[in-house]
Amino acid sequence: MKIALAQLNYHIGNFEKNTQLIVDNIALAKAEGADIVVFAELAICGYPPRDFLEFDDFISLCEAAAQQIAKHCVGIACILGLPIKNEVLQGKDLYNAAYFMADGAVQKVTKKALLPTYDVFDEYRYFEPNYEFECIDFKGKKIALTICEDLWNINDNPLYVSCPMDELIKQSPDLMINIAASPFNYRHDEDRIRVLSDNAKKYKLPLFYVNQVGAQTEIIFDGGSLMFNEAGELKAEMKYFAEDLQVFDVDEIQNVKTKYPLPERASDISQIHDALILGIQDYFKKSGFTKAVLGLSGGIDSAVVCALACKALGAENVMAVLMPSKYSSDHSVKDALDLVNNFGCKHEIIEIKHAADAFDGMLAEAFSGLPFNLTEENIQARCRGIVVMAVSNKFGYILLNTSNKSECAVGYGTLYGDMCGAIGVIGDVYKTQVFELARYINKDSELIPENTIVKPPSAELRPDQKDSDSLPDYAILDEILFQHIEMKKGSKAIIAQGFDEALVKRVLKMVNIAEFKRYQTPPILRVSPKAFGMGRRMPIVGKYMD
Amino acid sequence: MKIALAQLNYHIGNFEKNTQLIVDNIALAKAEGADIVVFAELAICGYPPRDFLEFDDFISLCEAAAQQIAKHCVGIACILGLPIKNEVLQGKDLYNAAYFMADGAVQKVTKKALLPTYDVFDEYRYFEPNYEFECIDFKGKKIALTICEDLWNINDNPLYVSCPMDELIKQSPDLMINIAASPFNYRHDEDRIRVLSDNAKKYKLPLFYVNQVGAQTEIIFDGGSLMFNEAGELKAEMKYFAEDLQVFDVDEIQNVKTKYPLPERASDISQIHDALILGIQDYFKKSGFTKAVLGLSGGIDSAVVCALACKALGAENVMAVLMPSKYSSDHSVKDALDLVNNFGCKHEIIEIKHAADAFDGMLAEAFSGLPFNLTEENIQARCRGIVVMAVSNKFGYILLNTSNKSECAVGYGTLYGDMCGAIGVIGDVYKTQVFELARYINKDSELIPENTIVKPPSAELRPDQKDSDSLPDYAILDEILFQHIEMKKGSKAIIAQGFDEALVKRVLKMVNIAEFKRYQTPPILRVSPKAFGMGRRMPIVGKYMD
């Protein structure tokens, strides 16, 4: 029996596009001799559909699309993820399910049992967990079909009290198929391979795993669909950050032929780089936009975002706006222009002095006698926000936000100023990682000016300002932030690791009181195991860690 | 046996304050002769603690506070809600629980079974559901203790497959106690009384219900703790929007004496009014601020917010900034000043012309040959944003956002302009309800100038602009929005109700494409069953309803 794994880029709620994509790939798989083609979890509507699921109409459209697709399942079977109604009165009204379709009709329904409800996942918000398990019989093989999280309950501190494969294995299946929507983070590829390999080993069955690919606003799917033999050895690995379709013969797993050799494990930074590019591309493609604008300061954050945008959208679609203030150093404009020249993107130079002076004048009476402080720094940052938003509004360019994760964490940014934007490109990338990204982008040639990388970071909002005036060294700051944000450690635990007590308390306090700012930041492309945004939900008016 | 119900205003994560409040009320209940005093769900840390729960340290602090409180339970027992560790390896690491404390120690633990995971609730994100049920024996009575949602599974389409009281009733309890953290919306008081009364009737037991009171950022608890006899008759109703403690004799329920007679059901608008005032007060009190700033346009939205702020914080703590542009009508400034005079709050008049002209000049070259359009309107709105944020930054005033729900819904507002603010006061109040609120505020005297109420709404960002140029009449718009947002109906269902097809499709499209704007709005005080914010989670890059 030949199984095709179809790793595709869906668009949430775009039934027309998703249906066409699925139908095209059924034809492709059939042409390649597949007996069955497997699509991802919730393929029909894209993942995560979030509260669209609460609209009856949306569920009906999913069902209608599935029925249309079923008609194409002639001479080939298909496994397809979709939300379906729970016809039992008790419990949530929906299941996260998969249809097994053959001979032009739905033959069997499989429902998801383990519903991830943590980090960016909200599945129990919508779905009833499944408690009934049955394998699929097809062409003399018994298939144990599970949906994503259903295979993830094997570790030392399992999140669920039950384990679906422990039930399915009682029916003596011949193979496992898992359909997933498993988002990228730079650690996830290794976790995924380990967990799936453990499943193959535990149940002594070959395992075929299909993931989605593509970005849905902040959530990025990296693809990387996988195939393991019954010893848990990885036999095939599909493309990362791109669509792919591969056909495998279940009876020839030991001699499997893949389109590509198994790739070497990519470095975290190269994965982050590729993820961000896909994230930018899909944000634009799926929103129907082509052109981006950003403020280019000469500093490293905006330089890296500009570079990524040029790679993702084409330099001709990127407008860099240089907005020097009276506190900008000469080299800032030069460094920014060098970058523009290296990439060949468009640029404008618009000085913000006139607007900043106008505000100072307008506020002179109200502020009379009060010294220059953060207020005036913020006014400059906000004048820049108005300028880039004006360019965005006038020309229909989408504003890219250039704040990094370290800044977002400690609130070192101006709300409605440099925190403006439709999508945060590097908001999940710590400052120390931004430097790594710059080096990675420059690996073949100096695209980002060396001076941008080596000069001390500065917001240039007052004379001779340096980030290090207000913040600890990024190397230390980022370590503390990682312990607190990714590792969820409180001050005591971090201090116990040897960090300075006063510093740890200061940093955690900054993180906590910046919650009101983060609430209003753009969605941030998620590349880490714990990104700001929907995956990290903190009280604003809360006192813990104050 | 005498039961004290303690309806208190907790502060999330403020263990010092919450512990003191609880200890004080144990003493108070004891002084009033109570045998047991009952506090709300998660009283110890406030509700909702959100991802604070993921920090081990936070859970330890909850436990430490509970142990401290237990020492005060001498000569009186206490029921207290808190998160506790799940010592079983399988399943989530926490339970939403309650301690029964007596004789200076924890005597029994009750765990929540039904975990609300919808709208603003995320409980399955953190907690393992409970499957074991046991009554509490105390002074010869058997108490069936449940936690909030545990009593809410009795309707025609139950959300859960199990029902905790169906288990507890098997142990023949003498009474029911339910501890809750049940947030306000203008429909919830009636739902709550009905559901709790149904429980008392179904199980033929008296029911004592304790809710929290107070606001936690956007979530407002209205209190209104309740007592029912075994026939399901409401025998006592505690204060709304205020702390309260009352003692009831379980053996004298038919002749219950309450501190107050049962109040008449308050109108939706009066409830919304009181909720918003509490919401403003607690946002400031719990954040440690006292003074507010807002932009006052002469229109009804900012007038109502100014009025609410003056009532909540005292007029002396409210700064209204009038920011006329060249398109502002003469009456706008007069109407705004009339309001300022009526309330006696502070004000500044800062014209935005200079800044707007400066931007026009700075952008002249980049925009040369292009006509005035939304870009220039947005620049004016954003200049106002900069001015009020500068006043906020300079004086430490908190900016109140004045956008209403109709605007938020259709995206009729400028991101980083009039959408700025720390907290959205009327972002869950439709425009037609804003008019009702104005009339309610004016019920005794004309505080909000009549002209502000009767003139046609306008953003005044270009000559002779009216909201009705871009939007349908608010009466119709709000009905369509209500059907879509609160009732979760798609276009087909709304059109089937008799609304114009083209209009419905246009409105729903506006709602959908404004998602990116709403993502960046301030938290909005929640007063309806479906508010924008954490309770409504929509994809941004999604195509459904486009």
Image: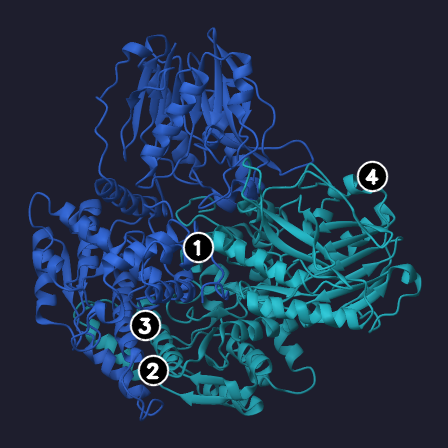
Chain colours: A cyan, B blue
Image height check: is A203 above or below B22? below
Q: Which residue is drawn at 44% across and 36% down?
A: B15
**Which quarter of the image is occupied by the N terminus of chain A?**
bottom right
Q: How crowded is mark 3: few (under 14 residues within 10 Å), some or many (20 or more)?
A: many
**Residue farthest top in this picture:** B140
Q: Do labels 3 and 2 share a chain?
A: yes
Which mark, residue A170?
Answer: 4
Kind of residue at badge 1: Glu
Q: Mark 1 points at which residue?
A: A515
Q: Mark 2 points at which residue?
A: A352
Tell me the mark number nearer the camera, choosing from 4 and 1.
4
The chain under label 1 reads A
Kind of residue at badge 3: Ile
Q: Earlier in the sequence, mark 3 or mark 1?
A: 3
- Return the x and y of residue A328 as percentages of the image width and height: 41, 82
Image height check: is B346 above or below B460? above
Q: Earlier in the sequence, mark 4 or mark 1?
A: 4
Q: Is residue B497 left or right of residue A176?
A: left
Q: Which residue is drawn at 25% across and 40% down?
A: B271
Picture quadrant of residue B79: top left
Give how far apart the Cα atoms at labels 4 and 2 are: 70 Å
Tell me the mark number nearer the camera, choosing from 3 and 1.
1
